[in-house]
Image (spheres, grey):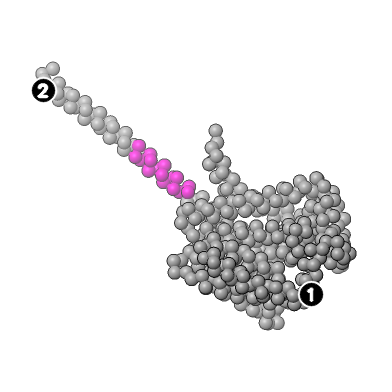
Amino acid sequence: MIGHRTINKYFNSSFVYLLVVITLVLWGLVVMYSASYHEAFIHGLPHYYFLKNQFNFFVLALFAAVVIKLMDFKYIEFFIYPLMVISVICMLLTLFSPFGVSIMGAKRWLKLGPAPSFQPSELVKVSTILFIAKYYSKENKKDLVAFLVVLFNAALILLQKDYSTTMLYLASNFLFLLVCGCDFKKVFLIGMFLIIPAAYAILVEPFRIKRIVSFLNPSLDPTGINYQINNSLAAIQRGGLFGVGLGNGIYKLGRLPEVQNDFIFSSLSEETGFVGIILTLLLFYFILKIGFATASKMLADNNLVKSYVCFGISVSISLQLIINVMVVTALIPPTGIPLPFISQGGTNLFFSIIEVSLIYKIIRENEQKDLEYEENYCDYGEKDDVEYKSKSISSINIGSDFTNYMDIGTGR
């Protein structure tokens, strides 16, 4: 019979992790195309326009993932601090240079030469996880340094008028700091201190106030501020058990504006139903389960950097998933948090793949280490067994000689 440990080891393997990630990414491309082709038609673009852009970032991420796999992890550690500096520079260039691209009043994108524009805030999210993981693996760490890095980057994201990402960034990193050993009282006090600027950021933007008021009063202005969330709930309800079929949704045809972005879960629910929702969430479950299991394994092996990296990335992905699903189901006020691997947005997809590539590398290296240990252990055990048998045979021979000697001595 196959033991529980063997089954658990198989389901936490790098093969299963890679298979689940590839499945989720390809499924995301299919769902995103189904949700976006009508939006492309409306703007006079080819039906595959959004899919093509998403696929281009997917290909770039694959190249980056291969580089990560080929690099020794010590080199990845070496580049963590420089990467943090580069991400901050990109944020500053976005805000204060002509390379920053403004869309709908928000300056969140950076365009450098022929390279496609991207959101540096996604780079900051990854680099901060790596920074905290490396910094808290050292003995001479100071919580103040980590707090300053997190708060400074959060301020830059907020200056880009990205309130939702700022809140997500702070929440995930504060939770991460607690896991890394930061004093709970310090995190709590900083959190309390941030309530005032967070409230101010809401009050200075009327649309944020409207979102909160509409969330508290769902029947208020059903054709205005509540139009999108009401249609989101209607789309989910229409999906039923098995959905109406991929490509057959009607709420993506103008009823849910920018449905391929933050509300893509609604389109997925309408077209694939409850079954599609469960299968999609199961893919996320396996990614997060293996990520947290690997973090625990690395912690047991006293490899703090790798453990913290796996945990930080898994926390970030899980919070994005939870917030997005809660928004489209009207459990929290609308935010601009995309659904990882599925929502349209090349930068988010690129760095999400980078994140899981780092976890995959850690899992793979750990498997190779365990395999080498088992091979060495087997070789050592066989050698001991041979030596033991040789000694036993020698003991038998010595015993026989002694018996013969006694026989001679007694004259037998």
Where does label 1 land, which residue? 206
Nearer to us in this view, 268 or 356: 268
- The answer to whether residue 384 is above or below residue 257 is above
* Place of residue 283 in the rendered image (x, y in percent of width and height, measured from the top left): 67, 50
Q: Position of residue 255 (x, y in %)?
A: 87, 61
Q: Which residue is mark 2?
A: 409
In this picture, is 193 found above or below 64? below
Three-letter code for the amino acid on which mark 1 is drawn: Pro
* Callout count: 2
Q: Is residue 233 visible?
A: yes
> Is residue 323 inside the magenta stretch?
no
- Name the spot of residue 390 as percent of width and height, x first: 29, 34
Q: Does residue 112 appear left or right of residue 380 in this picture?
A: right
Let me know if residue 379 is in the magenta part.
yes
Q: Residues within 10 Å of mark 2 (few under 14, many from 20)?
A: few
Report the amino acid beneath label 2: Gly
Whichever of callouts 1 and 2 sits on the residue coming sooner in the sequence is 1
Left or right relative to 251: residue 74 = left
| Range of residues picked out in magenta | 370-385
Which quadrant of the figure has residue 173?
Answer: bottom right
What's the CA distance linking mark 1 and mark 2?
112 Å
Residue 343 at x, y = what percent? 74, 60
Side of 344 where 13 appears, left or right: left
Please give the name of the residue rendered at 56% of the width and 72% of the height, measured from the top-left corner: 147
Tag 2 secondary structure: helix
